């Protein structure tokens, strides 16, 4: 991740709007469960759940189970992993 502060700033801007219309998001990661990356992503999802009082649940799909690594960017751009 190149700019984690940018990501957090972006989330701070969109989170209030997103929470008004959605409560569940899917997050794809190509890395297996026991890797540093996926463990951090799962912690991020847990932090969001706690910060929103359960108002936003992020389901982490690891190991390329939702989308393979090269397909994740396009899936995000086309809204395939947006709130349900």
Image: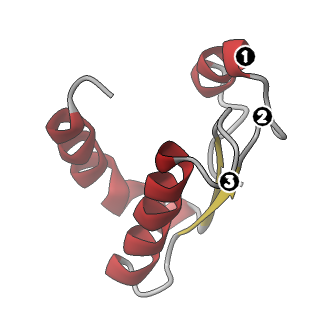
Pointer 3 residue: 33
Give the side of residue 65 with respect to residue 34, left or right: right
Q: How crowded is mark 2: few (under 14 residues within 10 Å), some or many (20 or more)?
A: some
Instruction: Residue 44: name its quadrant.
Output: bottom left
Residue 50 percent location from the top left of the image: 39, 82
First-in-chain label (3 vs 2): 3
Image vertical order of residue 63 relative to residue 20, above or below: above
**Measuring 33% from the left and 28% from the top, which residue is drawn there?**
1
The x and y percentages for residue 45 are: 49, 64
Residue 60: x and y in percent read: 66, 55
Q: Which of 3 and 12 is in front in this view?
A: 3
Q: Which residue in the rendered view is the most extreme toward the bottom?
A: 53
Q: Which of marks 3 and 1 is nearer the N terminus?
A: 3
Quadrant assignment, res 79: top right
**Does the CB distance between marks 3 and 2 fall below 8 Å?**
no
- Residue for badge 1: 71
- Say whether marks 2 and 1 touch (CB < 8 Å): no
Mark 3 neighbour density, 10 Å: few (under 14) some (14–19) many (20 or more)? some
C-alpha span from label 3 to label 2 = 10 Å
Q: Nearer the viewer, residue 33 or 13?
A: 33
Q: Residue 65 appears at what percent x and percent y?
A: 84, 40
Task: Note whether 41 is above or below 63 in the view shown.
Answer: below
Residue 64 image label: 2
């Amino acid at each position: 991740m190149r700019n984690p502060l940018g990501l957090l700033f972006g989330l701070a801007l969109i989170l209030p709007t997103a929470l008004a219309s959605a409560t569940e998001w899917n997050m794809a990661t190509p890395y297996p469960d026991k890797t540093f990356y996926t463990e951090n992503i799962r912690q991020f999802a847990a932090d969001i759940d706690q910060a929103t009082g359960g108002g936003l649940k992020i389901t982490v799909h690891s190991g390329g189970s939702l989308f393979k690594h090269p397909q994740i960017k396009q899936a995000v751009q086309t809204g395939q992993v947006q709130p349900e």
